[in-house]
Image (cartoon, rainbow, N blue to C red):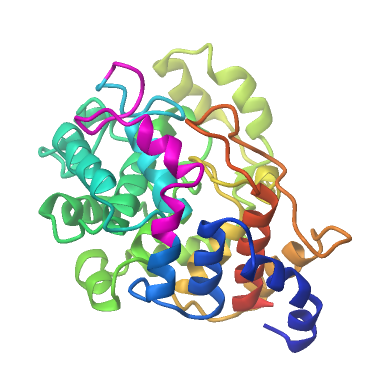
Amino acid sequence: MNMDIKEDLKKVLEKLKNHPSSLIKAQYLRRFENKGPADPAVQKLQKAACIEEPLMTIQADRNKEGWWYASNPGAMYKKYQGTSWTLLFAATLGAPPDHSLFRDSCKYFMDKCYVEKIGAFESDRRASRAFTCFTAHASYFLTYFGFFSDERVQNAFKWLASNLGIDGGMNCFVMEVMLNPTCVMVLPKFLKAAQLLRENERKELLRNSVSKAVQKLLDVKIDHYQPVEVTRWNKDVWTKSGKEIRKMKSEMKLSGQYKQKKSWTRFQFPLHYDSDLLEVLITLGRLGIKKNRILQGTAERIYKLRENDGSWKAKRTLNGKMWKDIKYQDDWITLRAIEALMYYY
């Protein structure tokens, strides 16, 4: 990070370093003092976080069999309280990776959601309805909680890599009703999972899919991937049959102009299936992608979104939808923003 910028953010960093949240303090050590997951100070804070909110309520609402969401063990995807979302949020928050309850729930999840036919995860085990984002999220939290060596997780990574389209976006059955031929929204989720792997593991499992996905994000200037015609398309498509949609696509003439994904500058923590600029830059930074004009320009956009006090604010929220509201959302956003700037400003 530029020294002038670092000095400018010194007070903000000090607040994060001495934060009342054990999770945020642990993330400060991981992100800004290069402490590894085995560092005693990090582990002590993560353990303390288990008796603080939101992890305390998340654990309390877990069924002893390993699932979340009322009395319905099949509701893996239930927004945003199902097992898959809860495990994703726990990993994103920085819960202890060796936590026995979360690890047992990961085992439960794999047993219930793995589709052997395709080597991916799907909430109802329908091979034809496997969302790439669902498998990308699962690959992330399963790897985070220590299950990368499981053959099912490695197969899921391979399945994601094999679903990259010719243009670098991700193939998914959902795109049949979308104007874009492939999904760009899932690329940050795929890369976020991939950055948890060692370099040799990425090369062995993912081949050149990581570089292709990165290049796609650069090609669309990170968040300029929606054709300007998408607004009109989305108004018309939902009342049409599959045959009508295919006909509409064949007749649609695109201008070649693209608009920004506005939500990607409306920062949120934790994220769901959508992404934001912070997630992209942090993920690319952790992957070791070198600074270039696009990435530096994106970092400048992030820097300009600071508030007068030098922090960043959450502009979207999942509070009221999860098992427990997330306190200190602005501080989580600020933590992420500073890490993003550290790589590319």
Residue pictured at 10% horizontal, 39% vertical: 116
Classify 48 as above or below 89: below
**Residue 324 shows up from this direction:** yes
Is 209 on the left-hand or right-hand side of 251? Answer: left
Residue 97 location, x and y as percent? Answer: 31, 58
Q: Quadrant of the N terminus?
A: bottom right
Residue 164 location, x and y as percent? Answer: 34, 53
- Judge by depth and name the residue closer to the eye, 214 or 58: 58
- Judge by depth and name the residue closer to the eye, 313 or 216: 313
Residue pictured at 70% horizontal, 47% vertical: 314
Residue 291 location, x and y as percent? Answer: 59, 80
Classify 175 as above or below 221: above
In the rendered image, which quarter is residue 79 located in?
top left
Residue pictured at 36% horizontal, 58% vertical: 193
Outermost residue on the bottom side: it is: 3
Classify 64 as above or below 285: above
Q: Which residues are magenta?
A: 46-72
